[in-house]
Image (tube, rainbow, N blue to C red):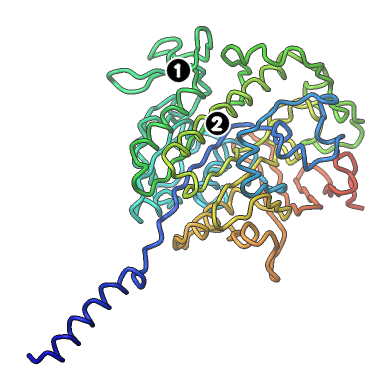
């Protein structure tokens, strides 16, 4: 080898060595997914929703009567708030089946509570698990039949670590034992919903939030997907101290819709035992929401400490709402806003701009195709919902967007209806009543039938 060839070879090697780092493309880091899912949650209890409502709609229980939710609000402020997000069916099991599968209840076939989900159902967690994600679930599941509490169901549906998943129940105290988690009130054979003696370690919301934190600690070095399903603020309306007395000072008033005329109402909109305000029950409901928000704060703190907050998609949502005395009703199952519309806020760094507000109609059935697209994952091709990712990313609807969400109710021993809703209109049909059409822009209280 002559001198000239040697210099050319060494110079080329040095140049290649120097340029290699500049040209080496780093593989994009896969985002984590954390879902915080509550049960029977009235959207008006969240500050991020109240600020987008008129004063009249934001404070239906009295002027200034509200619970502050700074941590959930932070998720909304740093990402998107969806103002027209609906439960595909405003009942626990059907809504949950649609949320995890992207399919309508009749396809899962969970059309009512306590119906097992089909074995061959593919969930977003299963897609992510196959893609190398560490997956897990803590809290209420309600998709494995009538087992109660039934810890760690054998059918995992992609949630590989489901030790702290229980099938159903609204337990207030939990504990770890050598045989696994258990309800800490009553006995193993007859667990109870008692809250006596619950503290910041044993109260269910705190207990499950800690298990979420433990999972994050154990899996922060690799992509993970975890779903925390908190059984509050579903009844019984009880909560640990100090939340049990935190809102006793508020002057709760009966929502004005509770005094509506009963003449000509459809069967699903009649009054049902909510025409007298129970301030204590509402105070405790607010307390449960505040406890949830404080635990969201604990989880956010962990993500910051692990320096993975900017690579974690965070979703806060619920299975359905709670009437909370609106229209003189309690609980859910009906197509009115407080029952069927649910909170949905998402923090998705680099893709969803902070402060985005999406007003187009979306639903639980749309979650799976949307979240997989946001995460750069291929869909399962079993979804029946829509990919709403462009709405979240751009804040605007695509040219071909069809702004209609379908939702339904009707399982065994339940009154059946089907509805279609946009960001402005809601049409409800049932075999027992004349059609009802609401104009939510002109009649936010949902008192007038515009069908004629």
Q: Residue at x 76, y 15 (%)?
A: 279
Number of other residues with Cα within 10 Å of mark 1, as a class: few under 14, some 14 to 19, many 20 or more: some
**Residue 311, percent across and down?**
47, 50
Say which quarter of the image contains residue 130. Answer: bottom left
Q: Which residue is mark 1?
A: 201
**Residue 363, percent across and down?**
64, 50
Q: Residue pushed farthest front?
A: 3
Dot 2 falls on a residue whose secondary structure is helix
Say which quarter of the image contains residue 161. Answer: top left
Q: Which residue is mark 2?
A: 297
Specify whether 346 is left or right of 310: right
Q: In the image shown, does 104 or 251 lie closer to the viewer?
A: 251
Dot 1 falls on a residue whose secondary structure is loop
Q: Residue pushed farthest left?
A: 1
Mark 1–mark 2 Cα distance, whole angstroms, equals 16 Å
Q: Is residue 85 above or below residue 306?
A: below
Q: Of marks 1 and 2, which one's residue comes earlier in the chain?
A: 1
**Residue 82, percent across and down?**
68, 48
């Amino acid at each position: 080898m002559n001198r000239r060839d040697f210099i050319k070879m060494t110079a080329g090697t040095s140049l290649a060595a120097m340029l290699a780092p500049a040209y080496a493309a780093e593989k994009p880091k896969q985002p984590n997914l954390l879902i915080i899912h509550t049960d029977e949650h009235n959207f008006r209890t969240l500050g991020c929703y109240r600020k987008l409502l008129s004063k009249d709609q934001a404070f239906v229980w009295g002027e200034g009567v509200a619970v502050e939710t700074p941590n959930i609000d932070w998720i909304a402020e740093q990402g998107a708030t969806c103002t027209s997000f609906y439960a595909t069916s405003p009942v626990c099991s059907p809504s949950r089946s649609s949320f995890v599968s992207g399919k309508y209840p009749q396809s899962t076939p969970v059309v009512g509570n306590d119906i097992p989900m089909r074995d061959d159902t593919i969930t977003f967690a299963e897609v992510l698990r196959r893609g190398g994600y560490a997956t897990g679930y803590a809290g209420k599941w309600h998709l494995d039949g009538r087992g109660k509490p039934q810890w760690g169901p054998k059918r995992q549906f992609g949630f590989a670590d489901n030790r702290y998943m229980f099938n159903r129940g609204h337990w207030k105290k939990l504990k770890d034992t050598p045989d696994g988690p258990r309800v800490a009130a009553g006995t193993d054979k007859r667990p109870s919903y008692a809250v006596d003696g619950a503290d910041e370690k044993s109260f269910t919301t705190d207990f499950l939030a800690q298990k979420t934190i433990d999972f994050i600690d154990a899996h922060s070095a690799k992509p993970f997907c975890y779903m925390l399903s908190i059984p509050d603020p579903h009844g019984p309306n009880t909560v640990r101290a100090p939340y049990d007395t935190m809102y006793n000072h508020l002057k709760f008033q009966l929502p004005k819709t509770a005094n509506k005329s009963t003449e000509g109402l459809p069967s699903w909109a009649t009054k049902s035992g909510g025409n007298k305000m129970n301030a204590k029950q509402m105070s405790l409901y607010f307390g449960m929401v505040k406890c949830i928000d404080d635990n969201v704060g604990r989880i956010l703190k962990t993500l910051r400490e692990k320096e993975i907050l900017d690579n974690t998609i965070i979703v806060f949502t619920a299975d359905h709402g709670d009437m909370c005395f609106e229209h003189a009703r309690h609980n859910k199952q009906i197509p009115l806003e407080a029952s069927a519309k649910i909170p949905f806020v998402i923090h998705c760094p680099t893709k969803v701009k902070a402060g985005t507000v999406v007003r187009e109609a979306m639903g639980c059935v749309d979650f799976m195709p949307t979240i997989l697209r946001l995460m750069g994952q291929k869909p399962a091709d079993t979804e029946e919902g829509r990919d709403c990712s462009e709405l979240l990313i751009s804040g605007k609807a695509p040219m071909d967007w069809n702004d209609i969400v379908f939702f339904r109710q009707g399982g065994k021993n339940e009154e059946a209806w089907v509805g279609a809703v946009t960001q402005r209109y809601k049409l409800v049909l049932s075999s027992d009543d004349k059609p009802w059409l609401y104009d939510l822009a002109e009649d936010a209280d949902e008192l007038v039938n515009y069908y004629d």
